[in-house]
Image (cartoon, rainbow, N blue to C red):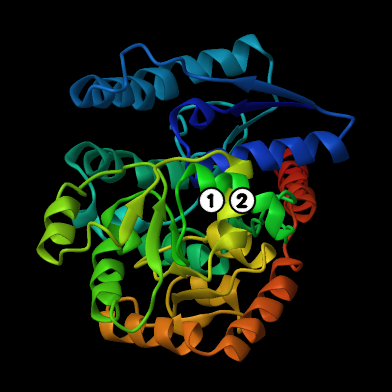
Amino acid sequence: MKILVDISALRLSKGGANTYITELFQSLEKIDKQNEYIKISYSPIFERNNKILRISDTILRELWWTQKIIPKLINSNNADILHSPSFLSPINICKPNVVTFYDASILRYPEFFNLWPKLYANKFYEKIITNSNQIIAVSNFTKSEILHFFPSIKEEKIKVTHLAANKIFKVQEKEMNKKTTKKYKLVKPYLLCVSTIEPRKNYKNIIKSFYKIIDNIENDLVFVGASGWKNSDIPGLIGSMKLENRIRFLGHVNTEELVSLYNSADLFLFPSLYEGFGIPILEAMACGCPVITSNSTSLNEIGGDSALKVNPLSSDEISEGILELVLKPSLLEFYKLKGLEQAKKFSWEKTAKETYEVYEKVIGQ
């Protein structure tokens, strides 16, 4: 069986799709020695540091590459199945097609997104969902969102495959973390946030909740992650609260540094407004970092009872949660141990086996 896989997100994203593609297909190639995985990728044509050219390049990828070129590559490679692991899939192909659906955030919160993604979602999402042979959802919550927004889809068409943290995320000796904390000049205890800086990650409420308790804790607030969209108000917000000396934005860091940052943090904050899965909370848990997260979307499902849950819309509740943990070492230790056990319940090997079962089901059909 030849399985054609579009891995374009590896070049174009540092977020969840990148992690999913990397981890899934490394694991698949370990457990599946019979089938051939043919990886294809769009190569950016324009310089992506320029906003206008980046948008143009995105449109080329989503229309010309996905809708025109991939169908030709399916035929020229004589592929048996196409897997579109970043949900950009051709709507007219004659071979079986599997798509991975992460979340319906653009349908649930269109105001958080720029114009082109919204136009694309309105034009193509339903066609992609309808024309696929099988849909992989990364959580039961995401499955429920698919059934909500596309009620004509039969439930048996959707397979849930949970994600996981990479095995590199683990508890380390303190000495191993000093190089990273020294590099980023993190001399004070800190609270950590890891995500692309965009509205649905709830950075405004995180900053507001931190401001309310700055006189009660000595911790700084550290953000790790690439800059996304609709975040130009951050400097003004921080400036108005005079938090320039208490909040740090480190940008994208490499994986080894991220492991050290999780290990060195007092607490991990992930009160996102919307998540299809939420890999960072498992990464933090695997590193022994206690977690505060949202009591909604997939985060209830993935965090279980191993994280402190808060209403992400309430900065007061986030503030109270931070104080409750930071000022009570015994509670921090409780959530640290619970988190370590929770992270063990998820593995990429399991995800790969369940994905392979989807391929077999599609071929059987």
The quarter in which the N terminus is drawn is top right
> Farthest right residue?
33
Which residue: 17% across, 40% down? 115
Question: Is 349 positioned to the left or the right of 286 in the image?
Answer: right
CA separation in Å, label 2 and label 1: 5 Å
Residue type, label 2: Lys
Which residue: 58% across, 61% down? 264
Q: Quadrant of residue 2?
A: top right
* Front residue of 72 and 43: 43
Q: Quadrant of residue 347?
A: bottom right
Residue 314 visible in image: no
Query: According to the image, label 1 marks what residue?
Result: 181
Q: Tell whether label 1 touches label 2 (CB within 8 Å).
A: yes
Which residue: 49% across, 25% down? 11
* Front residue of 317 and 215: 215
Residue at disc 2, secondary structure: helix
* Front residue of 45 and 285: 285
* Residue 34, x across and y down, in percent: 89, 29
* Front residue of 189 and 141: 189
Question: Is 254 positioned to the left or the right of 80 in the image?
Answer: left
**Considering only vertical position in the picture, is 163 above or below 19?**
below
Residue type, label 1: Thr
* Residue 154, x across and y down, in percent: 53, 61
Residue at disc 1, secondary structure: helix
* Residue 130, x across and y down, in percent: 45, 46
Query: According to the image, label 2 marks what residue?
Result: 178
**Considering only vertical position in the picture, is 318 above or below 247?**
below
* Residue 15, x across and y down, in percent: 47, 43
The quarter in which the C terminus is drawn is top right
